[in-house]
Image (cartoon, rainbow, N blue to C red):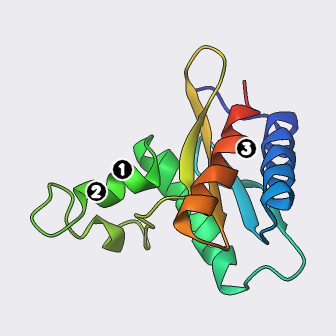
Amino acid sequence: MSDITLEQAQAAVAAALAKAKEIGVKMNIAVVDAGANLKAFVRMDGAWLGSVDIAQKKAKTARFFDMPTGEIGKLSQPGGSLYNIEHSNGGLITFPGGLPLANAQGAVIGGIGVSGNTVENDHLVASAGAAAVK
């Protein structure tokens, strides 16, 4: 199994941090490895304390299922095929802001989770981090 390197994890955090600063938001940014273990994390000054856990769970959720957390959210609505999935695995997050991280060959090597603002901004910042990993 391929795994994210520390260098890649730090690059993802740095790119996400730069995007958060660019759009003027305070974020918690978490990167997990292929086994969903925390690899890198940053909490910007003034970022919500409650979003620390959310960012980490978004990263884990994206890695556990190798899809964006927002997509899982669509499937987990009442009547959906994944309804109530957020109660599994010690708690998942099923709204945008978590993305799987893939290497240049397309193999999933980890996940990134961002929390601290609107889910749209969380996703935007996570996307910047994900783009830095290749």
Neighbourhood count class around disc 2 (C-alpha, 10 Å): few under 14, some 14–19, many 20 upward: some
Q: Residues within 10 Å of mark 1 (few under 14, many from 20)?
A: some
What is the x, y in percent for residue 84?
Answer: 24, 70
Q: Residue at horizontal 78%, vertical 50%?
A: 16
Of the residues shown, which amino acid type is indicated by label 1?
Glu
Mark 3 to mark 2 CA distance (whole Å) = 23 Å
Q: Secondary structure at mark 3?
A: helix
Q: Is residue 21 left or right of residue 122?
A: right
CB under 8 Å between discs 3 and 2: no
* Left-right relation of 128 to 57: right
Q: Amino acid at mark 3?
A: Gly
Secondary structure under badge 1? helix
Q: Secondary structure at mark 2?
A: helix
Q: Residue furthest left?
A: 79
Answer whether labels 1 and 2 touch (C-beta < 8 Å).
yes
| Mark 3 vs 1, N-terminal side | 1
Query: Residue 43 lies in what quarter of the image?
Result: bottom right
Percent x, y for residue 25?
Answer: 77, 69
- Is any part of residue 59 visible from this angle? no
Alpha carbon separation for disc pair 1 and 2: 5 Å
Q: Amino acid at mark 2?
A: Lys
Query: N-terminal of the two: label 3 or label 2?
Result: 2
- What is the number of the mark on residue 74? 2
**Residue closer to the observer: 55 or 97:** 97
- Few, some or many residues within 10 Å of mark 3 (<14, 14–19, 20+): many
Q: Which residue is mark 1?
A: 71
Quadrant in which the N terminus appears: top right
Is 110 displayed left or right of 31 in the figure?
left
Where residue 103 sits, quadrant-wise, is top right
Which mark is on residue 129? 3
In the image, farthest residue toward the top:
105
Residue at 81% over, 35% down: 8
